[in-house]
Image (cartoon, helix red, strand yellow):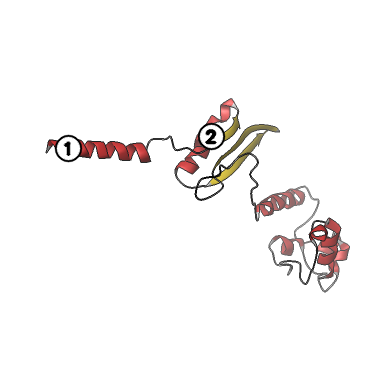
Amino acid sequence: MRFILRGSVILCFTISFLFVLPGVNCNVGGIVQNDWESLRALFEQNFQNNVDLGAPLAVYHRGKLVVNLWGGWFDKQKTKPYDNDTLQLVFSTPKGLVAMTIALCVQRGLLNYTDKVIKYWPEYGQSDKENTTVADVMSHRAGLPALRNSNLSTHEYLDWYSVIHKLEKQ
């Protein structure tokens, strides 16, 4: 009986050490200003709880960088640390920023959701797109899911005017 009790205590201690106590190597690096330390703990917790594999976090407050962290792993095998130089895919992240920018412009009276796009971009009205509104574009109802039939080179794809002219014509 004493052996079973001792074994149970050791097993419980081991489980609590592995799963409850912090200390998992999260490879977190970077800087955090004094009043922002709680964010470091939350950031590390994402890795300890397997919410994130690897990620960066930057927080600006009143124009000053107060948190600049990176951590975790680049690969599922956890052999390559996620560091300050790791490139991050952002996919649709800019959509939120564009939506906030447009909302701010609407709030300031610089544009209106019901306005036609051609009010601001006359060349857009080609190919039966003259009735498209700002709201249509913002809600992805403008009928332009991607550049159609475009055999753009990488150089052309990265050239603002090449892409804009393709969008105008389709």
On the image, the x and y values in percent for residue 106 come to 75, 52
* Residue 21 x/y as whole percent: 38, 35
Q: Is residue 122 above or below residue 41?
A: below
Q: Quadrant of residue 49?
A: top left
Q: Is residue 103 left or right of residue 168?
A: left
Specify whether 56 is left or right of 9: right
CA neighbours of label 1 inside 10 A, class few (<14), some (14 to 19), many (20+): few
What secondary structure is marked by label 1?
A: helix
Q: Which of label 1 and label 2 is nearer to you?
A: 1
Q: Is residue 148 above or below residue 41?
A: below
Q: In the rendered image of this protein, does residue 55 appear above or below residue 32?
A: below
Q: Counting other residues with Cα less than 10 Å from the Cα at mark 2, is it few (<14), some (14-19), or many (20 or more)?
A: some
Quick one: label 1 or label 2, which is nearer the N terminus? 1
Q: Residue at x 78, y 72 (%)?
A: 149
Q: Would you say 90 lies left or right of 142 here? A: left
Front residue of 90 and 108: 90
Type of residue at label 1? Answer: Leu
Q: CA distance from mark 1 to mark 2?
A: 39 Å
Q: Residue at x 52, y 47 (%)?
A: 53
Give the residue displayed 57% in from the left and 27% down from the top: 35
User: Which disc number belongs to residue 40?
Assistant: 2
Q: Which residue is mark 1?
A: 5
* Amino acid of disc 2: Arg
Label 2: state its secondary structure: helix
Q: Position of residue 119 (x, y in %)?
A: 85, 61
